[in-house]
Image (tube, rainbow, N blue to C red):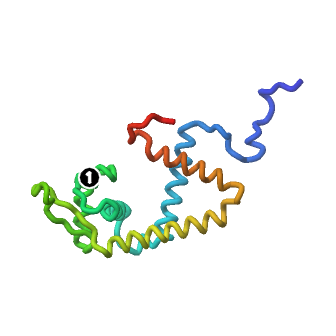
Amino acid sequence: MPDPSSSPDPSSSTGSPDPVSPTPETAQRLNDAIRRLRARLRTASGQHATGLTPTQLTVLASVVREGPVTAARLAALDHVSAQSIAQSLTVLKAAGLVRTEPDPSDGRKKLTSAAPSAAELIERLLAGRAAFLARAIDEVVRPDERPVLDKAIELLERLARAGLDDEEPV
């Protein structure tokens, strides 16, 4: 009877990775895949043509989504420093994409609002990303793989919430 420890690794003969790879390796693969996908989305959406950095566009999208909002709230939403928010808001204000006005409930605070052109820009960028992803899914993901993709999206959403919510891990 052959010794099981001497049998070839099934993944090495097929060239596919071990289905249960070590966490650091999996984390690096996920990071690399997300980085490549984000680059593709930036290109496909026309983000480079805006002249704004990814951070500035993230801040702008938060202002559009949240409505009149304080810089402190933006920093908390985007998980960045107040200084980073201030720098982004300075650029966005100079570009005419946002405006600030005193908070009517607390005159010491300023509320930032998006200009109509900002909402249009964010909508156009998001539509470009969605169109790219829809085409990519149609071309690359077989119909029988769609449930796997849905599960992967659920896992990515859980990873995105990790350590940020008060709910218990599932």
Q: Which residue is mark 1?
A: 73
Quadrant in the picture for residue 111: bottom left
* Horizontal side of residue 156 vs 15, given as left or right: left
| Residue 114 pos. (x, y %) | 28, 68
Q: Closer to the camera, 87 or 121? A: 121
Q: Residue furthest left?
A: 107
In the rendered view, tell whether residue 1 sits above or below residue 98: above
Number of marks in the image? 1
Q: At 70% from the left edge and 60% from the top edge, which residue is drawn?
A: 142
In the image, what residue type sits under mark 1? Answer: Arg
Q: Closer to the camera, 101 or 28? A: 101
Q: Closer to the camera, 8 or 101? A: 101
Q: Closer to the camera, 52 or 160? A: 160
Element type at mark 1: helix
Q: At 49% from the left edge and 56% from the top edge, which residue is drawn?
A: 35
Q: Residue furthest right?
A: 1
Q: Residues within 10 Å of mark 1 (few under 14, many from 20)?
A: some
Quadrant in the picture for residue 103: bottom left
| Residue 84 pos. (x, y %) | 26, 56
* The N terminus lies in quadrant: top right
Quadrant in the picture for residue 60: bottom left
| Residue 96 pos. (x, y %) | 25, 74
Q: At 32% from the left edge and 65% from the top edge, which residue is drawn?
A: 64
Q: At 10% from the left edge and 55% from the top edge, which residue is drawn?
A: 108
